[in-house]
Every structure is written in C-alpha cells, then in structure tokens.
Amino acid sequence: MIIAITGTPGAGKTTIAKLLSERLNYVYVDLKDFAVSNGLGEAQGDEIAIDIKRLPEVAREKLEKKDVVVDGHLSHFIPADVVVVLRIDPRVLAKRLEGRGYSRAKIADNVEAELIDLILVEALEKSDSVIEVDSTGKGPEEVVEEILRLIGNGIKKRVGVVDWTTYYDDIVQYLHVREGDENH
Ligand SMILES: Nc1ncnc2c1ncn2[C@@H]1O[C@H](COP(=O)(O)OP(=O)(O)OP(=O)(O)O)[C@@H](O)[C@H]1O
Ligand SMILES: [Mg+2]
C-alpha cells in the first residue's frame, strides 16, 4: 500500500511519515530524494523543482505493490492508496516557520496556503481517498494513532475537519502586505 503524507511545509509531514512507517513496518520515502534519484528533480537554488508531469507515472512504476509511506508536500501527485493531508493551525505554523528563520514572504506563502486549504483542495482533485488529520495540539504519537485508526477502519475519505478562517483576525498579521500598504 502507498500512503502519501502531504501538507503545507512545516505541518509535520516528516515527523509523522517516519513514525508511521516505523509503526507499519513500511519503507519511508522522501519524495525529494525519490524525484532526484529518478531524474525528476532539478536543482533550483536551494530548492529542488520536481517534474510534476512525469511524477505520477514514474511513482506508479517504482512504488506500485510496495508498502511505502511517501513524505512530501507534493506527495498527493503520486498514485497513492491513501492521501493523508496533515493540517496545522496557521498561528502555530507561523511560529514554527519563524523558528526556522524563514523570511516574512515565505511564512506568508505557507500560512496563506494552510489558511485556504490549498493542499487539501489539490489532493481532492487528484485522489478519491483523502484523509485529513488536524495535528494541532497533538503529539506525533497521537497523530499517528489517529491515522492508523482511520486506515485500519477502512475509512476512504474524511475531510472538512478544520476551518482556520475562524482565526482570520490573528492570522492576517502573517499574510502578505499589499503593495502600498507598508506605511499604513
Ligand atoms: N504533532 C506535532 N506536534 C508538535 N510538534 C510537531 C509535530 N509534528 C511536527 N512537529 C514539529 O514541527 C516541526 C516541523 O516538522 P516537520 O519537519 O516534520 O514538518 P514538515 O511538514 O516535514 O516540513 P517540510 O515541509 O519543511 O519538510 C519540527 O520541529 C517538529 O518537531
Ligand atoms: Mg519534511
């Protein structure tokens, strides 16, 4: 079975994917490493641009019938049996990304993506089996237990568990400042 762990950068994918793969005794696959070793990754400054067009086909060929947990914010583009979308309160995400020393612009990009359910919507466009899990205030073990329970119960789809717009007033400070607004 292929389990994809996706979510906004900083949502906790690597932490959860590694723990989940240990619990299931599945192979852990870092999507960036997978892309690079299969000629689907191109260095773009510090980052790697993944060839999203060829990714699904290559992933099918290399991972089909294997038991893997694939970690990456583009992992919903691979043909996975289950796509887990990890969610995190944008206010917590902003603090986490600040702690990583990310620029204001990069924090704004990611906080906005989380606020508007960007990855969830993309995942739903690509897959019929999408499980959304809110990790806010939960330890990694607890999140993994929740994923195992949902998959174990044969749940194919579970979405709509969060609505970050409730916290919009607290989140807006992290979003992009419009041009010309800087002095207001
Ligand atoms: N459930 C959790 N509870 C508390 N902290 C967590 C949890 N999951 C992850 N973290 C912490 O959040 C930070 C980011 O986690 P992680 O690196 O796993 O995110 P990521 O989604 O893989 O990020 P990236 O997209 O940049 O690879 C880490 O410091 C990690 O310890
Ligand atoms: Mg990661």
Image: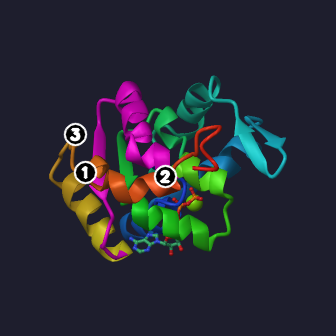
Question: Is the residue marked by circle 1 packed among few (<14), some (14-19), or many (20+) residues within 10 Å?
Answer: some
Q: State which mark lies toward you, 2 or 1.
A: 2
Residue at screen point 61% across, 48% down: 31
Residue at screen point 55% across, 28% down: 56
Is 142 located above or below residue 127 in the figure?
below
Q: CA distance from mark 2 to mark 3?
A: 25 Å
> Is residue 113 part of the magenta span, yes or no?
yes
**Is 4 left or right of 63, judged from the image as shown?**
left
> At numbered mark 3, what does the secondary structure look like: helix, strand or loop?
loop
Mark drawn on residue 28: none
Which image quarter holds the N terminus? top left
* Location of residue 111 in the rendering, given as x and y in whole percent from the top left corner: 49, 52
Residue at screen point 55% across, 41% down: 74
Q: Amino acid at mark 2?
A: Val
Question: Residue 142 occupies which quadrant of the picture?
Answer: bottom left
* Location of residue 87 in the rendering, given as x and y in whole percent from the top left corner: 36, 55
In this picture, which residue range is highlighted in magenta? 111-139
> At numbered mark 1, what does the secondary structure look like: helix, strand or loop?
loop
Q: CA distance from mark 3 to mark 1?
A: 15 Å
Question: Residue 40 occupies which quadrant of the picture?
Answer: top right
State which tag comes first along the sequence, 2 or 3: 2
Q: Amino acid at mark 3?
A: Lys
Q: Which residue is mark 2?
A: 111
Q: State which mark lies toward you, 2 or 3.
A: 2
Q: State which mark lies toward you, 3 or 1.
A: 1
Question: Is the residue marked by circle 3 packed among few (<14), some (14-19), or many (20+) residues within 10 Å?
Answer: some
> Is residue 40 part of the magenta span, yes or no?
no
Mark drawn on residue 157: 3
Residue at screen point 40% across, 34% down: 123
Viewer-nearest residue: 8 or 41: 8
Label 1 residue near ligand 1, CB within 8 Å: no
Q: Which residue is mark 1?
A: 162
